[in-house]
Image (cartoon, rainbow, N blue to C red):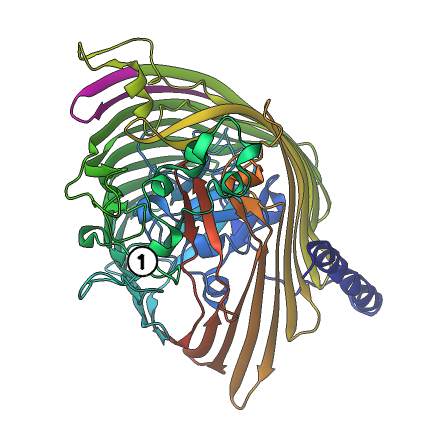
Amino acid sequence: MNKKNLAIFITALPIGAIGASQVAIAVEPPTSVFEPVIVTAQKREQSIYDVPVAISAFSPDTIERQGISDLVDLGKFVPNLNVTGFSAGQTSSSNPFIRGIGLQDHLITTEPGVGVYVDGVYLGRQVGQNWNLTNIERVEVLRGPQGTLYGRNSIGGAINIITRKPGDEDGGRMSLMAGSRGRLNGDIYSNFRLSDKFAMSFTAAYQSRGGVGRFVNIEDPAKEVGEMQDISGRVAVLFTPNDRMSFLVTADGNRGDNGLRPYDTLIDELGAACRANPGAFPGDPGCVRSNGAVYNAGYRDSDSASNPYDNNTGQSAQINVTNQSYGVSLTADFEINDSMNLKLIASDRHSNYEAGLDDDSFFDNFLAFPEIGEADQTSYELQLTGKTGAFDYVVGLYHFEEEGHNFQNDTTFNCGTPAAPCTSPNGGDFFLHQKVDSDAAYANVGYNISDKARVSAGVRHTKDDKSADTVLFELISESNSRNWSETSWDLSGSFKFNDRMTLYGTVQSGYQSGQYPARPYCLIGSFNFGTLTLSRPNCFVANDNVTARNYEVGLKGQPFDNLEMSIAVFNTDYSDLPYQVSTTAGGGFNTQSIIVDQTSRGVEWESTWAVTDNFRLYTTLGYIDANVKDPNPSAVAPLTPELTASVSPELRVAAGNGEVTIRADYSYRDSMYGEPTSDPGRLTFIDSRDLVNVDISYRPADGDWTVAAYGRNVTDERYDNARLNTGDYVLVMLSNDPSEFGLRFTKEF
């Protein structure tokens, strides 16, 4: 569908609701057909209409019917959200981009632009922590800088995953799913009271799916390309010694054992223009520089698999990728009095993975970067919330520390030719380590001017200390340290036209600390191989911190009995924003950042139209114009589609002694670029994509079970997830969500 027509179609849909509602209002008293949605986006329970932030909320039922199983799926149905998932060839990673801000990397010195939180605990690393979204209470997606209440690494937005608490109600549920491509999922959740003071819940889940391609040259491979298998569990115990005090202890873990994610390597495309017209490239005789090292060595696209979802690698050690994470947390709540509460959230988490890429994707070992990594984090947050008269407040202290490393052992870099293939790794080792300490204090105060008008203001001061070190080839070593501090703030005001409609305006600022280079092979240029000394200063330095300021106006609520909607218009200015650029320079894969300023302007729409008692239409639309201020006129915001949209009709039909629900979900993501440049010669243009899911379920009246038939990506749309031009080849990261059809059974008890 033409994207202009799609935008017009989605925004025109509510016109039908207006006409229908006017008739209904004339003959009936105002009644809502929508259940109230309560969120905790501002560290306290509020109606979603009262939060002066652009926010999307997903219930467990919605997640199940839309075919959402992880954060990558979530990115298909939120305006101006795009989630990629490729880091180090992993199938378990997720890299969210909100309003043009995110990060397509995973190494320890990098920092995401979108914060992911589970029950208030920040997840510092996303490899191995792509959370299974079964048996959760709610997912909230906050768009725009959230620097006051959420702090570091939320300059694009924040994603909150809220799990179910023990003791809410006795019972549980189990779910089984089986389908094409070897799909087999199962999960169980149980919540029960042990006594008047103790309650417990547990969740266990298993997910598996076959691959999307074959490792053609590996005899009896243990995995297929893109194969997925994940086991996860969570236990929570709640102790309430009295009515004013509670202690919640949780422990969770997951382990993934997967096949290398699908990707393709473009070789012939580099230098093609030069080879076709050498006279137009007088500074590149023989097109040596344009061709890139892989082509110059004698390899061609034909050396890769004919089907891009297959892989021709000959490196059997790199077809399997694994990950695991686990953690514990304590949440202590103290009700000091009827209008004041104190909360402590303490957490300790660990994650590790084993992955890496055979970048060339052909049989010979020309380019290979096997990799392991791990990270440990500890965080503490103390919150005081309360009300006094017309005022309410949130005050807090926060501490976060993280230490981790990445290690590439026996890498291979531009080694051999087709006539004389590489027989042993020649690239040496690469080690990167970082330690972070972050402290913050924050406060947010709201004042209810009247029953309809409210203003609030917040401030947060953060100080970050980082020390990092790296070793290349067991020969070149460097270390550095730096600290940053910044004060973020926000101002907001809202006006309620009635109990169901709110107009808000907000000014928010955000902060992100600077970063050290992720792959500092640039140090080779500063190293004297004769004296074995490294000159200083050199490239292993951190950039300045990023700041953001967002101006936003929004309207949300129920303008009519059968229409629920929200619309937000925003303008966000970013200063000193790092964009990653990777090249194969010197003796390895070098990643550095270019520093730019960026202004992002756009609009976001979400709506639910209850056309009849049995038919609803859900729509989302996001538009963004990201203007990058850089001397390079081709500079663009990477992995940022201009237009994002979804349309989801849902019909409920009586069937015998029960009800059938028929739902379809259409998702659109506009074309974009895999790098921060629109130069067509870079070959990083990513085409638009259209995805369709369907779900047909039956539930008996007063029953405790549901059976469903589902289809995901029913048109089998194959698309590029991301692209990266190193100068010697182009990596094309492919999608890992092919068409799938199956059955799902859910039972409550």
Residue range of the region highlighted in magenta in the rendering: 460-480
Q: Report the amino acid beneath label 1.
A: Asn
Whether 427 is drawn above or below 187: the answer is above
Q: Position of residue 432 (x, y in %)?
A: 25, 28
Task: Residue 315: tell me if it is visible.
Answer: yes
Q: In the drawing, does residue 604 fall left or right of residue 332? A: right
Given residues 533 and 301, the one toward you in this image is 301
Please name whichever residue, 533 or 184, is drawn nearer the observer in this view of the structure: 533
Instruction: Identify whether 110 is placed above or below 684.
Output: above
Percent across and percent down for residue 106 are 34, 38
In terms of secondary structure, what is the magenta stretch mainly? Answer: strand
Where disc 1 sits, the SS reads loop
Q: In what quadrant of the picture does the N terminus appear?
A: bottom right
| Number of residues whose C-alpha sits closer than 10 Å to that of mark 1, classed few (under 14), some (14–19) or many (20 or more) | many
Where residue 234 sits: x, y (%)? 27, 55
Residue 47 appearing in the image: no
Residue displayed at 47% across by 73% down: 711
Compared across the picture, whether 363 is left or right of 102 comes to left
* Residue marked by disc 1: 311
Confirm whether the magenta stretch covers residue 475: yes
At horizontal 19% and vertical 54% (from top left) the residue drawn is 316
- Which is more toward the observer, 144 or 492? 144
